[in-house]
Amino acid sequence: MSDKTKDPSEGEISEELEEVEASAENKEEAEKSDANDASGVDGDADVVKAKGTKKKSADKTEKSAKKPSAAPQEAVSGFEAKRAAIEGIFNPGKADLDVSSLREVSSEYDVTPKSGTVKSVAFIGGLLVILLGSMVVTGRTGDVISVIRGDYLEKKIAETRLAEEQHRQAQLDALDLYGTLILSGQPWDALIRLNGQVQYGQTSSGEWRELRLGASTPFQNLKVKETQTFEVSAAGHHPQTYEVTQGMWEQVSGTMDYRYNLTASLTPASERDHQEFNLRMESDLENDYEGVIKITTVPAGAKVIFNNNPLLDKDGNELVTPVTFDRNWVRNEAGKLEEQLARVDTPPDNGHKIQLQFPDDESMPKYVTQLQRRMWTCEWKDEDEVKKLGANATLLHQCNYTWNLDMDFNALKQYIEAREAEEQRILEQAKELQAGSAEAAGSEKG
């Protein structure tokens, strides 16, 4: 180290070295003086020298008294150790580092960090160790890796969003799904039972009528997740049963609605039935074919309105259920009774209108139906009856046409109540779903 860059402590070290050397010299002089005194040798020169030496020795001794006493060799060795330690700090390659000496030097020069800094670093390090340790113990090694990479927070946010989405999807999966089924096919006006029960719809006049097969007969609010069974039946045809399962529905794009189109096709019970049905539907209406209508109700006593007129007997008495008739009497403008037949070959899609009511009981629903030409049942005449027919008789003349209606108004009331309750439940569920979607949207914005 050059003079220009001397460490300020170097002067102190040099001074300490001089004091150690002086102490050693004084000791040597003292030993010589004691030897001379012991030998009894006197001389002026020696006395003068001794006095001078004693004076110098006293001066040296006074300086030495200011420092702690130590063996000369031990003092020199301590100094060299400290010097080597200091040089080891600034020039690590020049000498081996003595750890014990370094501790002494560091204590003298106060190279240890402040206690506050050490505590802060230790606290943060401790927290990190605890966090990483807990993640390892719980098996969340992925979180440990994320903390090390620095993307732990982003990972947690993504996991939270994924959990919320999964929870939301679970709620949607738990909800009932509803769809509309459109039923079409042949023959029209065939009776439809859904899951074993006749289905009804309400008209604009407030009356209830059964749903029958047509160009497009809709069934709304059907549960998509449940298997729906449709039974279609018509006179002179084999009944058919159809099942609609969840996988058959198609979701309407962008909505929670589902759709399915079902086509029913009934086959005639026999070739003879097939020919009779086609001939009946192709009739030119030149011949009149009459039939017998039989109506029973639960409870009994329902008023019958036939083609917008009360059903009357030939004496003008009003008839109630149960009732069987092939004609009715209607009062004209003059008040006279006129006979009207229950015709089979009514104009296409313009059959007999039949209404059933309980005027004295407002709790009872009102029923209406349209008896179309294709709804009649052909009961084949026996051979003796056929032989009595004339030469111009057709296949239609070989039939005794009937139409039976069994109407349970108590069951109809229960059907209406269940339908209204289901509609209310669906409405409340839709509101809950809408509220949940709004809440989820608000949390995403937040």
Image (cartoon, rainbow, N blue to C red):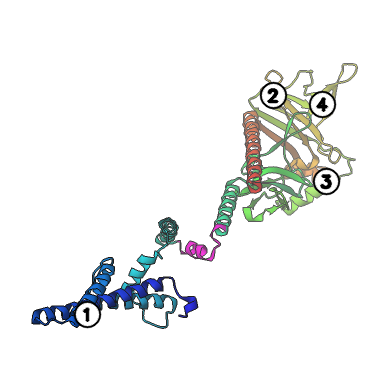
Residue placed most toward the observer, 96 or 124: 96
Let me know if residue 265 appears in the view.
Answer: no
90 displayed left or right of 434: left
- Observer-side mark, 3 or 2, equals 2
Crowd around label 4: few <14 · some 14–19 · many ≥20 (10 Å) = few
The magenta region covers 140-153
Pointer 2: what residue? 302
Measured Cα–Cα span from mark 3 to mark 4: 25 Å
SS at badge 4: loop
Of badges 3 and 4, the one in the foreground is 4
Q: As drawn, which residue projects farthest toward the front?
A: 44
Type of the residue with mark 3: Met
N-terminal label among 3 and 4: 3
- Tag on residue 333? none
Which callout, 3 or 1, points at the residue further toward the start of the chain? 1
Secondary structure at badge 3 equals helix
Q: Quadrant of residue 117?
A: bottom left
